[in-house]
Image (cartoon, helix red, strand yellow):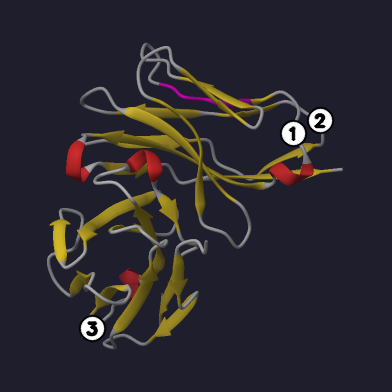
Amino acid sequence: NAGVMQNPRHLVRRRGQEARLRCSPMKGHSHVYWYRQLPEEGLKFMVYLQKENIIDESGMPKERFSAEFPKEGPSILRIQQVVRGDSAAYFCASSPLPGGTEKLFFGSGTQLSVL
Amino acid sequence: GNSVTQMEGPVTLSEEAFLTINCTYTATGYPSLFWYVQYPGEGLQLLLKATKADDKGSNKGFEATYRKETTSFHLEKGSVQVSDSAVYFCALSEGTGTASKLTFGTGTRLQVTL
């Protein structure tokens, strides 16, 4: 049973470009969480999604950031018009249970670098 | 708001040494507390947890006790191995139901040498 898969592992973008980060949850998991780790900080919650629904996006910046988890395919975190401050490690986690922090499985992250 | 503070790394120890990684937290309610571990090239994995004051979480020889009076959840292991080399994250969670969220510390890198 493959774990949570994130790709790419490393993503380099120039300011103003778009970044798309993908997350394939573990098989049978329908709950996905995105976290961001800025340099010298801890991971911070961004958004919680179920299939085709955003449940909690209280940690998402109000502009330029969006997330989706379609019926088919991976969850996508999309950052439009990236700025240097978006450089961070983005982690995805999945769970078989609603709000299941005790059964969260994390991917190994995508390191975004904005030049 | 909630926050987690853990000791800065890296922590370098010889094999069989005693390990302590300090973690303190600030929370408005009564959080659950967690330690996650990230081995090189892998995602974070839950190491242990405690859901109420005075609970002790344990796994793989690691232990941590939920201390409400000192708002701490220090990670300890009596004898570390080279295979314990990883980054350790302390975290807390408040809320139940459909929107539980974790607040993490910055992580502490542990390097164990022979």
Q: Position of residue A6 (x, y in %)?
A: 44, 70
Query: Extreme right residue here?
Result: B114
Q: Which mark is residue A11?
A: none
Do the residues bearing badges 2 and 3 touch, measured as CB atoms within 8 Å? no
Residue type of the residue flagged with mark 1: Val
Measured in 3D between alpha carbons, the distance from the residue under mark 1 to the one under mark 2, in whole angstroms, is: 5 Å
Please name the residue shown 26% across and 28% down the image. B27
Q: Provide the chain ID for the residue under circle 2.
A: B
Residue in front for this viewpoint, A83 or A32: A32
- Left/right of residue A29 with respect to residue B42 in the rendered view: left
- Cα distance in 3D space between marks 1 and 3: 45 Å
Q: Is residue A45 above or below residue B55?
A: below
Q: Residues within 10 Å of mark 1 (few under 14, many from 20)?
A: many
- At mark 1, the secondary structure is loop
- Mark 1, residue position: B80
Read off the residue under disc 3. Answer: A81
Image coordinates of residue B33 in percent, x first then y, are 39, 30
Kindly check if marks 1 and 2 are in contact, taking CB atoms under 8 A apart as contact. yes
Residue A67, x across and y down, in percent? 21, 70
